Amino acid sequence: MIKLGDYQILSVSNKNIIKVFKVLIYSILILSFLNCEEKALETNLEEEDKELDYSQSGYPTKRTIAKMYSEMAFHGATQAFLWGVAILVNDAWRQANLSVAGPLDFVSYNTLEEKYNIITSNLNTPYMVAFPNLKETGPLIIEVPAGPTAGILNDIESRHIADLGLVGKDKGFGGKYLVLHESWDEPNNHGADFVLRSKTNLFWVGTRILSTDSLKMKELEEAHKLYPLGEESNTKVISIGEQNYKGWHPEGMAFWKALNEIIQIEDFPEEDRYMLQFLQRVGIEKGTYFNPTIQQKQILAKAARHGKAMAESLSNGRRFFIQPFYGDKSKWTVPLKGLSNSDHINKNGMKELDGLVSYCWEAFSMSDGMMKELVGVGSKYLSAYEDAEGNWLDGSNTYQLTIPPNVPAEQFWSFIVYAQETRSFIDNKDRNPGVSSRDELVKNDDGSITITIGPEKPKEVSESNFIYSNQNEGWFAYFRCYAPTQAFFDKTWRLPDIDRKK
């Protein structure tokens, strides 16, 4: 028997001795590393503590108190920025609407050019959207016509209120919806078929007309009505036309000004009161004119920069808390996967702020059709930010995606490229950001379709199957299945990763 310290080795074989020495060496190395790491942490904390002054009796000095107040204001502002992401993604569109129409009018976004500045917009179906304010209207009636429509109601904080049309309570047969604030009593004899409640006064109602017949589409658009209970409808459908708007979040001080405007007109629910206190520290408070001090402006400017970086990290780096859709090393994820439900509250009553920011930094609207596994109903989205090797998608490179045959979509599918900075359609050479099964695409012999994305079109690639990217510009992609079949959910059909051509 060989004795080595406190270890006894029963066998004298060379292999066993080598194994024991390896274990000892690895253990010593790990302990040394942990010890060094602990010492480094202690050193860093000591350096930070030097910035904190205390009196002999243990009280923080005025310098320390001032520094801590500034730190509290900054950290609170970054959290308020993240909270504001889900609000201002809706307000950006609200401002576009109100530039051409009233709050009880629908604004239509039909052509590619009209939708170009909406973040992660659909390429193929027309939108029509209105932004009522319950504080101004009181109980509100929404009339939905019978027919192929898919509508959504979301409050200003991106909470889902209801679906309308084919995926709503009317199941495509149409009906009257009464919208009330959650604190209101239901009026008598209102005559509505369905009653909905909103946590906020500001909300939006939007719908997609799924008919491809232009006359039917116009008829369905004009049959949608919005009016206060007991009044006549004066709803108009107005095209956004050539209006120059930005559908993404404002930056810098503009972000805080926009958020302040919403704070002034909205009555937020109890769950948001902490955020309202964070904003109060930097001069944003309901009923108070927003006139930040020089120090508050400095804090807000820094918080806007850091808040944006946090939002981008949550959105683009979602792989760190959202599993790939196909498991393994797949780069396709589900944009809404960071949320348990469309109310943003998980089973433990926790607000899922990270998942909400991850989604709302790059997208708008939530519906049951998007959240639930509904075969043949609604739509399902997959998103990709990296190529098959795990590198960010870069407009300077050329990529290919081969879409297998028999895509699990009863209606149609689409593949769209978005700019990383604006999260809207990529503003490329030919103003064509995507393709769909409604296009005349060239198929491979096995029925699959290969899409190429890059700054220059290779000679061998068909124009119909090519999407231009921009040099030195990051991009990401959405793959959408409309009326998804069972093969989408059980993953018997699998979308491969986007490959970089070298």
Image: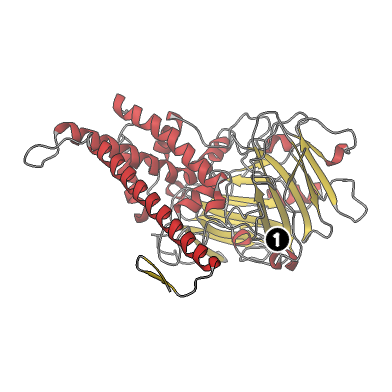
Question: Between residues 365 and 371, which one lies in front from this camera angle?
Answer: 371
Q: Viewed as shown, does residue 452 lie left or right of 229?
A: right
Q: Residue at x 70, y 41 (%)?
A: 417
At horizontal 33% and vertical 50% (from top left) the residue drawn is: 273
- Can the viewer see residue 204? no
At which x and y percent is residue 470?
A: 71, 30
Q: Is residue 408 above or below residue 403?
A: below
The image shows residue 367 at horizontal and vertical percentages of 59, 58
Residue type pointed to by label 1: Ala
Answer with left or right where residue 199 lies relative to residue 126: left
Q: Residues within 10 Å of mark 1 (few under 14, many from 20)?
A: some
Residue at image position (61%, 66%) is 169
Residue that carries the numbered disc 1 in the rendered image:
146
Establish if 2 lies above or below 387. Answer: below
Q: Looking at the image, which residue sits at the far right?
A: 445
Secondary element under disc 1, as helix, strand or loop, is loop
Q: Could you tell whether 137 is left or right of 418 in the image?
A: left
> Picture coordinates of residue 193 (x, y %)?
57, 66
Q: Would residue 56 appear left or right of 427 to someone viewing this image?
A: left
**Which quadrant of the figure contains the N terminus?**
bottom left
User: Is the C terminus in the top left, top right, bottom left or bottom right quadrant?
Assistant: top right
Towards the viewer: 419 or 152: 419
Q: Locate residue 484: give its quadrant.
A: bottom right
